[in-house]
Image: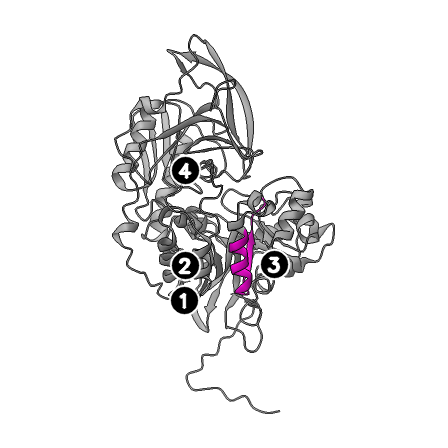
Amino acid sequence: MQAIVLAPNTEVLETDGFVLPGFCDGHMHIESGMLTPAEFARAVIPHGTTTMFTDPHEIANVMGLDGVKLMHDEGLQQPINIFTQMPSCAPSAPGLETTGFEISSEDVAEAMHWPGIIGLGEMMNFPGVINSDPQMLAEMKATARAGKTIGGHYASPDLGPAFHAYAAGGPADDHEGTCEQDAIARVRQGMRSMMRLGSAWYDVKTQITAITEKKLDSRNFILCTDDSHSGTLVNHGHINRVIRHAIECGCDPMIALQMATINTATHFGLEREIGSIAPGRRADLVFSSDLTLLPIDRVIACGQTVALAGQITTECPHIEWPSKARNTVRLGASKTAGDFAILAPKGSTSADVRVIGVVENQAPTKALEVNLPVLNGKVSAKGDVCQIALVERHRATGSVSNGFVSGFGYKGNMAIASTVAHDSHHMIVVGTCLENMALAANRLGDVGGGICVWKDSKELSIVELPIAGLMSDAPASLVAAKADKMVAAMAVCGCTLNNAFMQHSLLALVVIPELRISDLGLVDVTKFEMTSVIKGTQH
């Protein structure tokens, strides 16, 4: 037998456990972690993540192509693989919201030549794809010409001709499925079904039966996180958390690992680079002693040990974030309680109103109708219904659009405000007290963005997010500690929902049914049109 000759300084590692390919997150937004790419990488490397496919469309809505480039540039410097999908839809639904910047088809065509751009980010404007909108077609054409992958986002429950038209339009994957039939429909149309477990989206258990019971080919399925905040990353994990969850839901461990390694790599055309342990591939490896519990003993990225026994052992370089990225919250004049008042028709004692109904652990909302009392000429929230407002924060117009939301369980005089407001990222304020809503909004204007919770005119918690009003460049552990305090403050205010902040932050995402709020008013996402808060009145 021929002896193996090792190169000088070769490190020989031995294990009694298993060596696995490094884990890949097939679809995610770094900004949802409230961290910069460097700090996000630092947080997830000990969890076995060696590759991330990221769509920075959050910062694109605030800063345009400049913001995308900053995320892309810092991502390329990290010790793990961070591939960027060029954002496709800013705004996500033209005509229904106003963003800080808009992404054009020319921007997409330019970005396709950047190193590290892996494809086009999720096509959230699914009506545009279905109806052959010229800009959507131009963006997909530029991506196809570059030989790169077009990401999908089909949030409608309609699996008929509209869905078939979307699949035919170009998107190659979709992560918006919430049930078994959604998963089956996507793979039958030639798409990859991405099953997600984020901080608030629990869509793996309801779809994994397409594999475990219906026996569809597992090579057509991918695991992803989509949105995970810093508390989840620090306390529970990243894509390793999704793999473990899939196993708990009855998935064979080898198939669960397949869906977070080679399947993801193949989908993006990188199977000759990552996703497996084979000659010629990058040495991205995870050592684990158990394939079910999946403890992460050692992480190797590009041939170097980057984490050991849960501790990072490498540096994650930062870029210098410019002042234009740190001064993005522009409210104009300070807000007052009057800015959040919803005036009733003259002479009325009650009003039938449309209410956004939050659904726990899912992204879609329900369009509810509730009769509310009128006090001193203003519609007054009661019971589980509280007020929601979207405060314009990009151009200092001073505008505020108001509505109602239910499902959080808030009680007493409280408010929570956030400049994380997918996808337009104005400022969402939810509360039971107009004065507290004004206090919370003004506080975020003073600190340059973030999340704060107020009760009885006192601040209970704040998470400062000075970069684009979305991220902090502080270590994940510090941001997570503040996020944990925020969650506790929400509970003090009566909130009982799991990861309620993620629900809060998506209330302005006007491409997910049924009812949302934008800076232009209340949006009926089943019809993709504006609607009135008070029934029978003009929008």
Q: At label 3, which amino acid type do we have? A: Met
Q: Earlier in the sequence, mark 1 or mark 3?
A: 1
Q: At label 1, which amino acid type do we have? A: Pro
Q: Position of residue 136 (x, y in %)?
A: 53, 50
What's the residue at 56%, 30% (across, down)?
A: 366
Distance CA(mark 1)–CA(mark 3): 23 Å
Distance CA(mark 4)–CA(mark 1): 32 Å
What's the residue at 39%, 12% (across, down)?
A: 377
What's the residue at 71%, 52% (across, down)?
A: 188
Q: Earlier in the sequence, mark 1 or mark 2?
A: 2
Helix, strand or loop under label 3: loop
Distance CA(mark 4)–CA(mark 3): 31 Å
Distance CA(mark 1)–CA(mark 2): 8 Å
Helix, strand or loop under label 4: helix
Q: Earlier in the sequence, mark 4 or mark 1?
A: 1
Q: How many marks?
A: 4
Residue at label 3? 259
Q: At label 4, which amino acid type do we have? A: Val
Q: Position of residue 263 (x, y in %)?
A: 61, 62
Residue at label 4? 487
**In which quadrant of the rendered image does the N terminus lie?**
bottom right
Q: Earlier in the sequence, mark 2 or mark 4?
A: 2
Q: Is residue 533 left or right of residue 132?
A: left
Helix, strand or loop under label 1: loop
Residue placed most toward the observer, 37 or 191: 191
Residue at label 2? 41
**Label 1: how many Cα within 10 Å (few below 14, some 14–19, many 20+):** many
Q: Which range is magenta?
A: 137-154
Residue 331 located within the stretch drawn in magenta? no
Query: To which quarter of the image does residue 492 belong?
Result: top left
Q: At label 2, which amino acid type do we have? A: Ala
Residue at label 1? 79
